[in-house]
Image (tube, rainbow, N blue to C red):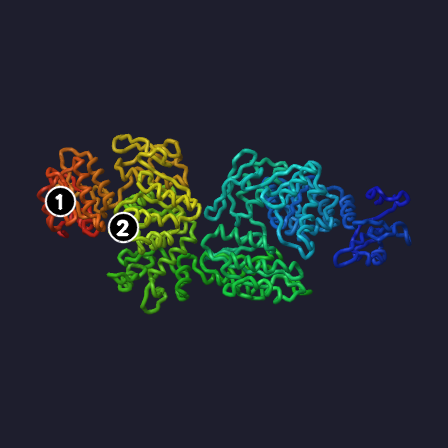
């Protein structure tokens, strides 16, 4: 090769000077090579000129003053030998891929590069990436020593890639590489700037110099009319924009507010992130399984870069769901049976560590987070206490260990980090393998461990020793060992952890949980709860006889089938709460003065036709029923629906803290349990306790016809919850009733949902049933497209027992129609039941009422019973029979034509049925549970009048 073909300004007399190749390492010089004598920070290449000549070099490029021929060697002077080397190298190997992209920034370079690589590969375009992870093509991956490779090696690599017909190449451009001119001589079509934060100040000395090195890419190395991709929200954006204007470069930005590619919404759904974006006036949505919100911006930058590589945005967006995590970058390693996670991350700067931990904490709320990390030696020392402070801020446990100490004292490095970590949190374990093992074995159900600093690296440096060491391999090895001690059943793992029990066989089968030994089936767990009246520990033998696989007990002999604890209810409650945090099911929690169970039944049964659902049986809405129902959630449930009851203030708060609902529903507020409150306003306030425990970005569903709608809405808005409403009358509600049309045996119920009409068939037109239907539609609308639901989805819904179910019973050689409203009674539920009964159309028969006391109304009892009596007078109902002292106020208010019998004892109910009711007459029974009418009504249903 002739030198004048590569250096145009060479003196005429030297223009035919011959060279065979180039080098900057004298040991690698060959005959007739050009040796570039680089004066580095540690080694001065000028000292090796003679050695290069001995090895055969015939040309020397250096910063020395002498130029010309000396001892038959051509000396060429350069003020910047590194730059000259790069420009020369890229001319020697001039055939390069056409579409070169460079990505620079403190954090995210490897992720952006790899996502770009994956997008093009998924779209079947030939592509390569070069950087920290190595040289990657569709066919191979080769390791490299530096993020930005030396120019000679890089020029050869690019030449080889071109030969392989790869024209799309993305390179990571480090600040070292840019400052040392390793990329000079290349022209990039697109330059990407991710961010800038504290790093490499041991080399750059000042933050200003660090930034200047990064910006060199955009000032000097982009093609004319090239592209810049960056984040509009970073502090450096204004500097980058000025460069784009001066150099006439196209700039595209990503942003949450005002970028070319704008994030409209971002939510976590189960294990995925769902992102809605706007690009060139079009709206798109994509899902990703990648961990951490920080990954979203990396993806967006890669997406824009991909569009500069002759890919349509539509094709780009269609591949995002399939992106895999980048090696060692927020990468989940392995799977642990107790649903804990180990995440490997390269984060080795304060900003990267904070972004990673913040992202993990945001995505995995209510989880304990631990970290294994250290800092490298012979590098920026100022970042060490900063990283200690960040780990302390975001983590519950810190396993402080060695990174790459190099030639520094490892203990001194750890001491510098430890300054800002609470003593109660820190576990100092110098040996990195031991630290990783300890951290993994300490992981409880749902805990998160991040192993930070080394990421994909495969060696660890102690002075001159570079030993093979992989965080990834250590993690996988210890997960395998840990999994041998765990059960595949998450519930069993939780119980063993909380009780510190190791003698229970890990392969024991668990189906459901119960606190009633008589309801136990094969492989159920029995929780022996000691209550006021019964001690569950006395029924353990019965539970095992019925097939229980495990019992949670206290004060009993040890057994491989028993977990012995002090407080079984406490264990049930705590384990239910932990289970809730570790399942992806969406939880709907219902409270209100009445209608909770009916709504839960309708919502549960309806959703169960289109999804996997668990909902609480019967009225499991107290401190026993709620955790038990929650514990019976299944791993593959899409939804869990639970009701929450109360007698006094604080109970809803306690129960909803366990449930942590995604959706909270308040059906209504009435005088139920008013004796424990000073006013109905206090009841409304107590019901609002559910609102503060709804998950962030959750939904609150309210009855717009309820008098406390605005009160509850205001509280919900303060928490930034999404407020939805339903109404029988108000057209401004999210879901409202439009019309009812009777069609033979069913009703066509037309609704408006967000001003769009839809109809469903239903088997009732009673007010309470219609309210429950509207509330159920509102719940489902959060997760499903209502317009696509089958019109018969809600048809043939069975009313819950005791909530208005109608049954034909044969008694004393005659049939009666029993309207069972006997499950509890309060002013709102009673008035609704009376209204429904009054609306019933019957032929040639009579309607009869048996009303028991409404209890727990305190000083309001007389007033509220009297009001019910007045409301009955406005109906066509007659034959009103009463039992109880409070109903006498109601009875005395009735018109004489409506009065039936005052029943003094329960045996007189037989006389009522036997002597007053005729064949095919209707009887509605309603009263508070404590009156005993509910259990008596159940006996009547079975025809067991002798029980009365």
299 left or right of 443 in image: right
- Across and down, in percent, residue 631 comes to 36, 54
Q: Secondary structure at mark 1?
A: strand
Question: In which quadrant of the rendered image does the N terminus lie?
Answer: top right
User: Does residue 128 appear left or right of residue 511 in this picture?
Assistant: right
Residue 345 badge: none
Q: Pinpoint residue 717: horizontal percent, then vertical percent.
A: 41, 43
Q: Residues within 10 Å of mark 1 (few under 14, many from 20)?
A: some
Q: Which residue is mark 1?
A: 811
914 to the left or right of 474: left
Nearer to us: label 2 or label 1: 2
Q: Residue drawn 70% across and 52% down?
A: 176
SS for dot 2:
loop
Q: Is residue 147 left or right of residue 324?
A: right
Residue 473 pos. (x, y %) = 57, 59
Quarter of the image holding residue 497? bottom left
Instruction: Say which residue label 2 marks.
Output: 678
């Amino acid at each position: 090769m002739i030198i004048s073909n590569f250096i145009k300004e060479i003196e005429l007399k030297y223009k035919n000077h011959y060279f065979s190749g180039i080098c900057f390492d004298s040991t690698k010089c060959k005959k007739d090579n050009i040796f570039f004598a680089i004066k580095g920070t540690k080694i001065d290449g000028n000292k090796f000129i003679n050695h290069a000549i001995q090895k055969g070099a015939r040309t020397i490029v250096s910063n020395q003053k002498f130029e010309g021929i000396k001892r038959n060697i051509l000396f060429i002077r350069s003020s910047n030998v590194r730059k000259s080397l790069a420009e020369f190298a890229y001319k020697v190997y001039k055939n390069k891929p056409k579409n070169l992209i460079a990505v620079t920034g403190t954090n995210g370079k490897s992720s952006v590069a790899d996502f770009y690589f994956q997008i093009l590969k998924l779209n079947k375009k030939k592509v390569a990436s070069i950087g920290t992870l190595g040289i990657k093509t569709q066919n191979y991956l080769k390791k490299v020593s530096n993020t930005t490779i030396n120019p000679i090696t890089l020029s050869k690599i690019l030449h080889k890639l071109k030969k392989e017909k790869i024209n799309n190449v993305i390179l990571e451009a480090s600040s070292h590489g840019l400052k040392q001119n390793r990329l000079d001589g290349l022209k990039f079509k697109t330059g990407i700037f991710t961010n800038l934060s504290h790093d490499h100040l041991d080399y750059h000395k000042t933050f200003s110099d660090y930034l200047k090195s990064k910006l060199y890419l955009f000032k000097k190395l982009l093609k004319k009319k090239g592209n810049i991709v960056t984040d509009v929200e970073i502090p450096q954006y204004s500097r980058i924009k000025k460069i784009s204007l001066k150099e006439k470069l196209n700039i595209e930005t990503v942003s949450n507010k005002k970028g070319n590619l704008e994030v409209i919404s971002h939510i976590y759904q189960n294990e995925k992130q769902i992102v809605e974006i706007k690009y060139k006036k079009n709206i798109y949505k994509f899902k990703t399984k990648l961990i951490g919100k920080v990954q979203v911006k990396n993806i967006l930058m890669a997406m824009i870069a991909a569009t500069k590589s002759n890919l349509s945005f539509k094709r780009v967006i269609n591949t995002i769901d399939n992106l895999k995590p980048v090696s060692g970058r927020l990468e989940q390693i392995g799977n642990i049976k107790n649903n804990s996670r180990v995440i490997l991350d390269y984060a080795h700067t304060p900003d990267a560590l904070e972004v990673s931990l913040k992202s993990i904490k945001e995505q995995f709320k209510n989880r304990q987070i631990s970290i294994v990390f250290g800092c490298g030696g012979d590098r920026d020392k100022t970042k060490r206490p900063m990283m200690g402070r960040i780990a302390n801020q975001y983590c519950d446990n810190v396993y402080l260990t060695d990174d790459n100490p190099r030639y520094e004292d490892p203990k001194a490095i750890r001491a510098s980090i430890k300054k800002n970590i609470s003593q109660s949190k820190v576990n100092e374990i110098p040996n990195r393998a031991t630290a990783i093992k300890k951290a993994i074995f300490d992981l409880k159900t749902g805990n998160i461990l991040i192993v930070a600093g080394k990421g994909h690296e495969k060696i660890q440096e102690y002075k001159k020793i570079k030993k093979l060491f992989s965080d990834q391999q250590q993690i996988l090895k210890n997960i395998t060992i840990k999994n041998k001690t765990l059960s595949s059943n998450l519930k069993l793992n939780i119980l063993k952890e909380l009780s510190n029990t190791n003698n229970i066989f890990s392969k024991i089968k668990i189906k459901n949980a119960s606190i009633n030994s008589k309801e136990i089936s094969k492989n159920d767990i029995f929780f022996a709860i000691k209550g006021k009246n019964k001690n569950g520990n006395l029924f353990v033998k019965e539970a095992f006889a019925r097939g229980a696989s495990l019992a949670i007990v206290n004060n009993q002999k040890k057994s491989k089938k028993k977990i012995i604890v002090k407080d079984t209810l406490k264990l049930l409650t705590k384990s239910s709460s932990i289970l809730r945090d570790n399942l992806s099911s969406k939880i709907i929690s219902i409270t209100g003065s009445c209608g909770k169970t009916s709504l839960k039944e309708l919502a549960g049964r309806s959703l169960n036709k289109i999804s996997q659902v668990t909902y609480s049986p019967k009225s499991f809405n107290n401190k026993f029923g709620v955790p038990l129902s929650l514990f019976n959630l299944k791993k593959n449930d899409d939804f869990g629906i639970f009701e929450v009851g109360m007698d006094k203030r604080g109970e809803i708060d306690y129960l909803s803290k366990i449930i942590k609902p995604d959706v909270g529903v308040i059906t209504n507020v009435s005088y139920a349990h008013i004796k424990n409150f000073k006013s109905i306003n206090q009841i409304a306030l107590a019901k609002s306790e559910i609102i503060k425990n709804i998950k962030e970005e959750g939904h609150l569903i309210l009855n717009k016809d309820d008098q406390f709608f605005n009160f509850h809405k205001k509280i919900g808005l303060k928490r930034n919850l999404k407020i939805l409403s339903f109404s029988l009358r108000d057209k401004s509600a999210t879901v409202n009733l439009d019309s009812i049309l009777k069609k033979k045996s069913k009703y066509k119920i037309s609704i408006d949902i967000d001003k769009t009409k839809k109809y469903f068939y239903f088997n009732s037109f009673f007010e309470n049933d219609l309210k429950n239907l509207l509330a159920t539609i509102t719940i489902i609308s959060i997760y499903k497209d209502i317009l696509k639901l089958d019109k018969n989805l809600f048809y043939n819904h069975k009313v819950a027992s005791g909530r208005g179910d109608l049954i034909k019973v044969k008694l004393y050689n005659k049939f009666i129609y029993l309207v069972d409203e006997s499950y509890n009674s309060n002013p709102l539920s009673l008035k609704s039941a009376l209204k429904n009964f009054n609306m019933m159309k019957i032929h040639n028969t009579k309607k009869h009422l048996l009303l028991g006391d409404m209890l727990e109304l305190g000083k309001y009892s007389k007033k509220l019973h009297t009001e019910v009596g007045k409301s009955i007078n406005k109906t066509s109902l007659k034959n009103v029979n009463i039992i109880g002292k409070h109903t006498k106020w109601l009875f005395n208010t009735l018109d004489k034509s409506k009065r039936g019998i005052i029943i003094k004892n329960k045996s007189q109910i037989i006389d009522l049925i036997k002597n007053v009711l005729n064949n095919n007459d209707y009887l509605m029974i309603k009263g508070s549970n404590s009156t005993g009418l509910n259990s008596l009504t159940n006996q009547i249903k079975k025809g067991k009048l002798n029980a009365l």
